[in-house]
Amino acid sequence: MQPQATTGLVRRLREGTPRLSAMARANDAVAELFQEYADLIAITGGEAFRARVYEKAARAVAGYPADVSTLDRKGLEGIPNVGGSTAAKIAEYLGTGRIEAVEKLRGRIPAGVRELTRIPGLGPKRAVQLYEQLGVGSLADLVTAIEDGRVAGLRGFGARAVTNLQRGIELLAASGGRVLISEAAEVAAEIVGLLAAVPGCMRVEPAGSLRRMRETIGDVDILAASDDPEPLMETFAGLPLVADVIVRGPTKTSIRTAAGLQVDLRVVPPAAWGAALQYFTGSQAHNIRVRERAVRAGLTLSEYGLFRADDGELIASGTEEEVYRRLDLPWIPPVLREDRGEVRAALRGELPELIRVEDILGDLHTHTDLTDGVSSLEEMLAAARERGYRYYAVTDHAKDLPMQRMTDAKMLAQRDRLRELAGDGGMVLLHGTELNIGPDGGVDWDAGFLAGFDLCVASVHSHFGQDQATMTRRLIRACENPYVTVIGHPTTRLINRRPAIDADWDAVFQAAAQTGTAMEINAFPDRLDLGDELIMRAKARGVRFAIDTDAHSTVHLGLLRYGVGTAGRGWLTARDVINAWPLEELRAFIDAKRRAG
DNA sequence: GCCGTTTTCGGCCCGACTGTTTTCAGTCG
């Protein structure tokens, strides 16, 4: 490796991937500290279960709807997996901005050692070994140590291990890891289609975070059922899209595509399908929760089935429903399997009846070629009718975005055209617009002109860098506009490309709930905005939602499923979503706000 | 350090694969 290349590599490693959001909530800082504490415990050789305790606490705090800074000691202990000691640490952080126990461990090991564990294949044990035996305290140190040949020859580091380490470092620098759900879904669909044709393949489906519909995917998990795994393994490892075979065993093979995406294939006997699908869907945290429950019932759960612990007799394995049922649980939808209280809710019979794609009766945020869309009004309407929508809103950009060249006259002409097309085919046409929320919270037109629209979406398109107070006022003022029905892509993040704007989201959601303004769940795969955690926080404040595609072409209407998946991850039902309501109810929602204003 | 539909104390999910190991530790999911 050339020295110059090394420098660039290390710089990219150090910069890492941009944070997806800049949401300042004490919960995020606390979760971050607890995760670091868990890592440090593992690195310094602390007891494994203590590391797990803080990992669980980190997740619980990050996903907790209430801001921890508003909770007293008792409230803190009410968070799942937070007991007296952990609550004390949160209180300590809120009071002093630091946690002494974390500082202490930080003092024992350089931050760079924790950084090392981001390299695939390098865990806490070997990272600390590199530090203690070679003084490697950063990624840069490690690159140098490998080049100097000091790593080869360490106990446990053969030639093979060093090669893998080098590859891991390059991989970390190149990808930073996660891809959009749409990219992963396309790769998965292609592979599933090819494997389904292999003789002996009984079933094959994507599992993992793709089945749980996480907003980004680290690697694609595919599960297949067959009594004869070898032909599947053979086919998989030989697919044209394979750039690299990482792992190749009798029942598990991992490859990397030319684009750098890792895909894992697991093959299980058909009789174990349900247990295996449950296991490989995860999340890991959900599985641990479910397996602990099995252990307490004198059972043990693996990808091969649910067994009695004493004599090993098989209790269930054929379907997921059966596995959950034998643990006295209803089937839990994959989008909920994140250990965010779904097992507890399931036990109480309180699982939400999640919104489905077929519940959506119309799209409320779409474009045409009048502004930046590529399909004509007629083409968009035909595609919408094809989907069976009851109603459909056309919401081209308004006049404050100069690049869109919108004028009052063009907008009114579009409205006339829309009215002419109405009544044909039973789908009700709504004329709307996507307003621009200006830096001060104002929008493109005055009340007189806005009153002519059936509904308005309003979104931030510029001045992303405003401070939190200004941005919060801006969004609240938009909510207070009587003609704004939906706030479009509220955080304006672009996944892997642009961070979220900084706002006090709890204050914004409060205003949205009070004014009867819906928050959009923009279904575009690089937006998914709001995301699942903010959806949960908004729902807790009584906010309503609109799941829209923001389609700029007829093919984009099909992206709706990603928005619905994200809504499900936020525990939403059809009642929470205004475009799952009959038209009369939707109109009543719009009119109530206009009258109140 | 947290937690309980047999527990307020004594446990803490489970298996595949790799590499280097002469019987298994480390890592991953």
Image: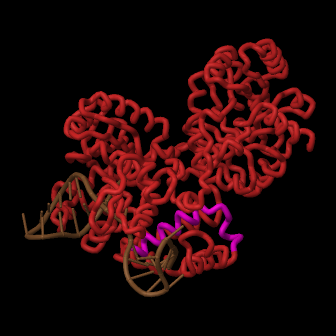
Chain colours: A red, B brown
* Residue A315 position (above or below residue A183): below
Residue at point 63% right, 25% down?
A552
**Residue extent of the magenta highlight:** A49-71
Residue A146 falls in image quadrant: bottom left
Q: Quadrant of the C terminus of chain A?
A: top right
Residue A45 rendering spot, x and y as whole percentages: 34, 76
* Residue A596 position (above or below residue A539): above
Q: Is residue A362 visible?
A: yes
Side of A333 relative to B28 (left or right)? right
Total number of numbered discs in the rendering:
0
Residue A355 rendering spot, x and y as whole percentages: 62, 42
Residue A406 rendering spot, x and y as whole percentages: 77, 23
* Residue A392 position (above or below residue A226): above
Side of A339 relative to A144 (left or right)? right
Residue at point 61% right, 45% down?
A354
Q: Is residue A24 magenta?
A: no
Q: Nearer the viewer, residue A527 or A265?
A: A265
Q: Is residue A12 visible?
A: no
Side of A172 relative to A578 (left or right)? left
Residue A92 rendering spot, x and y as whole percentages: 61, 79
* Residue A545 position (above or below residue A146): above
Side of A151 relative to A417 (left or right)? left
Q: Nearer the viewer, residue A318 or A514?
A: A318
Majority SS type along the magenta span: helix
Q: Is residue A52 magenta?
A: yes
